[in-house]
Image (tube, coloured by chain):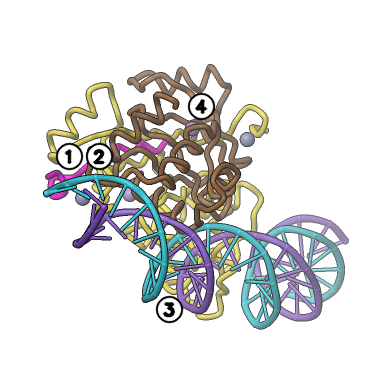
Chain colours: A brown, B yellow, C cyan, D purple
Amino acid sequence: MDSETKKILDVVVENGYRLTSARLAIITALVNSAEHVTADDLADKVRQQAPHVGRMTVYRTLDLLCELGIVRPIYQGTGAAHYILMAKGSHHHLICNRCHGVIEFEECFAAMLIEEMAKRFDFHISSHLLEIHGLCENCYE
Amino acid sequence: MDSETKKILDVVVENGYRLTSARLAIITALVNSAEHVTADDLADKVRQQAPHVGRMTVYRTLDLLCELGIVRPIYQGTGAAHYILMAKGSHHHLICNRCHGVIEFEECFAAMLIEEMAKRFDFHISSHLLEIHGLCENCYE
DNA sequence: CTCCTCAATGATACAAAGTATCAATGGTAT
DNA sequence: ATACCATTGATACTTTGTATCATTGAGGAG
Ligand SMILES: [Mn+2]
Ligand SMILES: [Mn+2]
Ligand SMILES: [Zn+2]
Ligand SMILES: [Zn+2]
């Protein structure tokens, strides 16, 4: 059992959701997917280990993980949403408008970060999108 | 003719794309949509002024505007991508994981920005996503 | 301005992605 | 061990996005 997997399962349980075998299989497959996966990609992956898990359950589990702030869907040039892990508290991308390529970087952002990234990856920036995730005033407890 | 609309049309023309009546209608409708619209939402809006414009053309025009860095699709709780304007160079959101509500803010980010936003909107942050858009080494000329 | 050319369009048909429903099941509290 | 009810998975469906292709019109050449 991966420690990152366990951490996510803890969040699920702490929030009063049941620890089912389907959820265990889905979260394990998700953490073991290095890249960003779509819901149907993930469903295929899950079924390699746990053939009984239905497609709907994968969709519902991903929705749940969104609500818990563990994953976030993004668009990556195809019709389907791709899910990225937010469990570590942040996630950073350089995204090409043309080929939809994604460059990952780990540093937390600072004022001068953008210029630095432009130099490091020879990336020609036209804009940026920042998303901060969490719970709003009304939803927090 | 809105000046923001004109600026976008200029980018289209400067990049060698034709200035068609369909594109004019779509871009005008897009700029005049305050909120984030889906492709089909936009198609409906466009047809109120230019009934001949087809759904496919709206999808294709949005793809083009993505490539030009003018818009960016984001996930907003429904199955369809919502398009946000990137023409001003940046776009900032606070997004609620639960209700999918979006709070807009204009300031460019800095190191202390996150804490400030948390206080200002009483928003309980669990993570953040930063996307920088542009062209990568290979695609830039 | 007129004529050509090919980028762009829109109709159509299709595939993929996401949602609704509900009877059956299994996690968890007691 | 039992019972309750959150969760599941099968099915059917809607919505969203894509492929194709004959037709059109924007814009450059003359
Ligand atoms: Mn990533
Ligand atoms: Mn916005
Ligand atoms: Zn690229
Ligand atoms: Zn909320």
Whether pointer 2 and pointer 1 mark residues with C-beta atoms closer than 8 Å, the reply is: yes
Q: Position of residue B95 (x, y in %)?
A: 28, 45
Q: Which label's residue is closer to the chain start, 4 or 2? A: 4
Q: Residues within 10 Å of mark 2 (few under 14, many from 20)?
A: many
What residue did someone put label 3 on? B48
Q: Which mark is residue B123?
A: 1
Q: Position of residue D28 (x, y in %)?
A: 76, 55
What residue did someone put label 2 on? A134
Which of the pair A67/D12 is nearer the observer? D12
Residue A2 found in image quarter: top left
Is residue A65 in the magenta section? no
What residue did someone put label 4 on? A104
The secondary element bearing badge 1 is classed as loop
Q: Is residue A45 above or below residue D29?
A: above
Q: Position of residue B88 (x, y in %)?
A: 39, 43
Residue type, numbered disc 4:
Glu
Q: Which label's residue is closer to the chain start, 1 or 3? A: 3
| Both labels 1 and 3 in a single chain | yes
A5 relative position to A138: left or right:
right
Looking at the rendering, the stretch of residues picked out in magenta corresponds to A128-141
Image quadrant for the C terminus of chain A? top left
Disc 1 to disc 3, how far (Cα)?
38 Å
Residue at coordinates 57% horizontally, 69% vertically from top-left? B21
Which chain hosts label 2? A
Image quadrant for the N terminus of chain A? top left
Disc 4 to disc 3, how far (Cα)?
42 Å
Disc 2 to disc 1, how far (Cα)?
7 Å
Residue type, numbered disc 1:
Phe
